[in-house]
Amino acid sequence: MPMSQESAEVVGLKALEWLTSQEDVLPVFMGSTGASADDVRAGAADPAFLGAVLDFILMDDSWVQSMCDFAAIPYDRPMMARAMLPGGAAVHWT
């Protein structure tokens, strides 16, 4: 079943909430993206930023599992949400 843009943003917000609660993962995100604490706060209102948060979390299966357990959502939801947010369309190289 396709996910709505609004539902995808809710998943992105849950991902951001999880990320900010992770003392060991948040600095990695901020260091790899160059995001400041102000950027992270402002990003909560930006669907493209939420997509970037999901991209980051989707790099590590243990982060996906932890975030999904934290948010009480199925493990496939972050990928589904990412596809619905800006920049999440599948890339076709052919």
Image: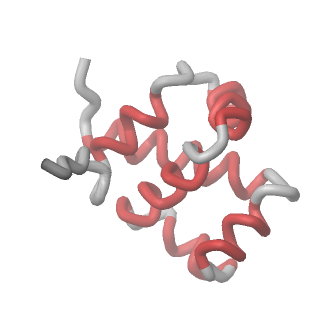
Q: How is the image coloured?
A: secondary structure
How many badges with numbers are in the image?
0
Q: Is residue 78 left or right of residue 87?
A: right
Q: Is residue 24 left or right of residue 2?
A: right
Q: Is residue 57 above or below residue 37?
A: above
Depth check, front residue: 4 or 92: 92
Q: Please name whichever residue, 13 or 62, is drawn nearer the observer in this view of the structure.
A: 62
Quadrant where the N terminus sits is top left
Q: Position of residue 39 (x, y in %)?
A: 57, 79
**Residue 77: percent from left, percent from top:** 46, 28
Compare residues 58 and 21 and report the one nearer the observer.
Answer: 58
Residue 76: horizontal and vertical position, in percent?
Answer: 48, 24
The residue at the point 38 percent across, 39 percent down is 81
Compared to residue 94, the image places residue 50 above or below, namely: below
Q: Is residue 62 above or below residue 88?
A: above
Residue most toward the front? Answer: 94
Residue 53 picture quarter = bottom right
Residue 4 found in image quarter = top left
Q: Check the image and name the residue furthest to the right.
A: 23
Q: Residue at x 28, y 58 (%)?
A: 86
Image point (78%, 68%), residue name: 27
User: Does 84 sit left or right of 46 as displayed?
Assistant: left
